[in-house]
Image: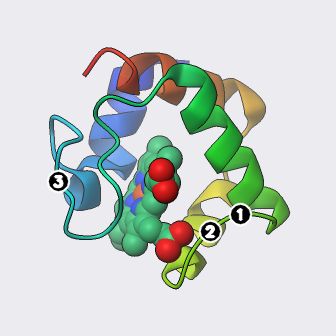
Amino acid sequence: EDGKALYTAKCQSCHGADGAKATMSKPLKGQSAQAVVKAMEGYKAKTFGGAKKATMENLASRLSDEQFKALGEYIAKL
Ligand code: HEM
């Protein structure tokens, strides 16, 4: 999976091109690949999140483990 293409298409509108946008959530910039994967798995399993988790649960439910990994690796380098 291409983490950059996935991020650009599905994440950047809310989290910003550099992952630093903090208006919606804690910024993604600075998070490890492992932390991103763990959060995405948690959203998919509905065991993680805050007051605005519904959006992320919907998104995560349509993504695979391979896609979580690719996104985590890309975000960790932002
Ligand atoms: C939270 C990743 C797309 C809105 C998060 C968090 C991660 C994440 C890892 C948890 C941050 C933390 O608490 O440390 C992603 C990825 C995306 C994506 C990888 C693309 C696949 C979007 C989109 C929106 C959005 C498109 C807006 C429509 C939010 C909001 C939160 C959040 C509102 C806080 C949710 C809560 O209350 O738990 N995102 N995001 N995200 N994201 Fe995204």
**Dot 2: within a 10 Å radius of its alpha carbon, few (fewer than 14), some, or many (20 or more) residues?**
some
For the C terminus, the quadrant is top left
Whether the residues at callouts 1 and 3 have beta carbons within 8 Å, the answer is: no
**Would you say 25 lies left or right of 47 here?**
left
- The x and y percentages for residue 12 are 25, 48
For the N terminus, the quadrant is top right
Per the image, label 2 sits on a secondary structure element best described as: loop
- The x and y percentages for residue 17 are 15, 39
Per the image, label 3 sits on a secondary structure element best described as: loop
At 29% from the left and 70% from the top, the residue drawn is 24
Residue behind label 1 places its C-beta within 8 angstroms of ligand 1: yes
Ligand 1 sits in quadrant:
bottom left
Picture disc at residue 35? none
Upstream in the sequence, badge 2 or badge 3? 3
According to the picture, the residue beneath numbered tag 1 turns out to be 48
According to the picture, the residue beneath numbered tag 2 turns out to be 49
Q: How far is disc 1 from disc 2 in space, using C-alphas?
A: 4 Å
What's under tag 3, amino acid-wise?
Lys
According to the picture, the residue beneath numbered tag 3 turns out to be 21
Q: Is residue 8 above or below residue 2?
A: below
